[in-house]
Image: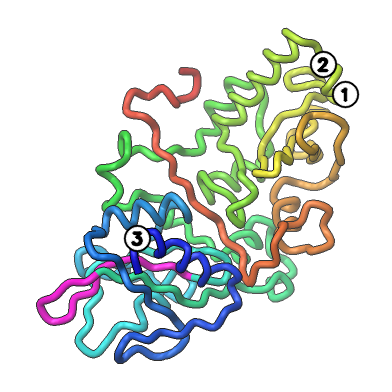
């Protein structure tokens, strides 16, 4: 298998995520698959390539030391296949629907070889969750999210601009906007960080909400608001404040009506800010129902065996130009 064939072969194993995984490596059991790595490909290059497709990885093993917190929920099935003289020296893990994707170095005797592994991944079904669980706790459960994933992989650190990941600075955004943000949204981005649910619903960090609001407001002042009917852009009374979007150009706003941000309804439009659909629910409830309810009008567009959160961990440029207000 050459380098051009590796990614298509890998993606064919993870989507659809219901195919039987059959490993042909000597001494390995069933229930996973190992891929042949092209000659001349290094670990950091491979991690970078996979990260561009599947987001920021979790570090399961680094310099021969395994994460003691590694579990079925956080990628352990990627390490389990190796034994009988095989020692995992490095392993990075990505969640993608009902699959774990692993990339690392395995030592056999005095020889080190690269390994790419695909293993099954499961998360609780929505109807298995406690009835009294909060909407945020339900999102954490059905995506299998682990807050410890919000970090920088040491293999990728030297390739990043500054080594500082983008954070959810809600206080700075609220000061700039002149209003508080919904409290459940703040808990959502503080828990998950920068990324997208099911690799599809891209939830904006607070700094991006500010930039989107300021752009829309400036555009409306220059061109008028006819295309925004019936709701003008924020900061007009009852104006729209964007908090998420998808690659299909669906946009998700709050209607900023009333003094209590926790009572702001969700508002969804297609392509532009024209008349949309109003939902009387919080941000976290809305996101959970998108993932869990196939009858939801904006449910996820694919039938995944499991949900996940694709962590971007996009870095700040070293000169700080991506900081709020610069």
Q: What stretch of residues is rendered in magenta?
A: 100-113
- How many other residues sit within 10 Å of disc 2, few (<14), some (14-19) or many (≥20)? some
Q: Residue at left 55%, top 56%?
A: 309
Q: How far across and how far down the image is residue 125, in percent? A: 68, 73
Mark positioned earlier in the residue sequence (3 or 2): 3
Quarter of the figure with residue 44: bottom left
Residue 280 image offset from top left, x and y in percent:
85, 45
Identify the residue at image location x=37%, y=29%. Answer: 317
Reading the image, the residue beneath label 2 is 225
Label 1 CA crowd tier, 10 Å (few <14, some 14–19, many 20+) = few
Gap in Å between the C-alphas at discs 1 and 3? 50 Å
Indicate the secondary structure of the residue bearing disc 3. helix
The location of residue 36, given as percent across then percent down, is 33, 73
Q: Which residue is mark 1?
A: 229
Residue at image point 53% right, 47% down: 195
Magenta stretch holds residue 227: no
The percent coordinates of residue 160 (x first, y second) are 32, 40
Q: Which residue is mark 3?
A: 3
Q: Secondary structure at mark 1?
A: loop
- Relative height, residue 283 to residue 64 (above, below): above
Up-down relation of residue 180 to residue 64 (above or below): above
Asked whether residue 105 is drawn in magenta, I would say yes
**Residue at the outermost left position:** 110
Q: Nearer the viewer, residue 55 or 63?
A: 55
Give the Cα separation between the discs numbered 3 and 2: 50 Å
């Amino acid at each position: 298998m050459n380098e051009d064939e590796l990614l298509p072969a890998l993606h064919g194993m993870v989507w659809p995520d219901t195919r039987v995984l059959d490993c042909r490596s000597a001494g390995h059991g069933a229930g996973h698959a190992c891929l042949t790595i092209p000659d001349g490909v290094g670990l950091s290059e491979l991690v970078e390539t996979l990260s561009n497709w599947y987001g920021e990885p979790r570090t399961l093993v680094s310099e021969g030391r395994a994460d003691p917190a590694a579990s079925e929920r956080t990628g352990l099935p990627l390490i389990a296949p190796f034994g009988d003289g095989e020692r995992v020296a490095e392993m990075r893990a990505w969640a993608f629907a009902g699959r774990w994707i692993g990339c690392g170095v395995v030592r056999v005797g005095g020889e080190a070889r690269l390994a790419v592994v695909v293993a099954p991944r499961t998360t609780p079904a929505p109807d298995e969750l406690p009835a009294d669980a909060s909407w945020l706790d339900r999102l954490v459960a059905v995506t299998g999210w682990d807050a410890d994933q919000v970090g920088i992989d040491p293999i990728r650190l030297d390739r990043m601009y500054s080594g500082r990941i983008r954070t959810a600075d809600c206080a700075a955004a609220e000061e700039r906007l002149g209003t508080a943000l919904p409290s459940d949204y703040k808990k959502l981005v503080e828990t998950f960080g920068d990324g997208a649910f099911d690799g599809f619903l891209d939830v904006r960090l607070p700094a991006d909400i500010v930039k989107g609001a300021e752009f829309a407001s400036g555009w409306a002042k220059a061109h008028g608001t006819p295309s925004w009917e019936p709701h003008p852009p924020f900061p007009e009374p009852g104006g729209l404040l964007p908090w998420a979007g998808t690659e299909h150009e669906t946009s998700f706003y709050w209607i900023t009506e009333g003094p209590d941000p926790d009572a702001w309804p969700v508002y969804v439009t297609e392509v532009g800010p024209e008349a949309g659909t109003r939902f009387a629910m919080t941000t976290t409830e809305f996101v959970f129902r998108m993932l869990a309810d196939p009858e939801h009008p904006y449910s996820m567009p694919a039938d995944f065996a499991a949900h996940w959160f694709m962590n971007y961990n996009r870095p700040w440029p070293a000169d700080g130009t991506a900081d709020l207000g610069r």
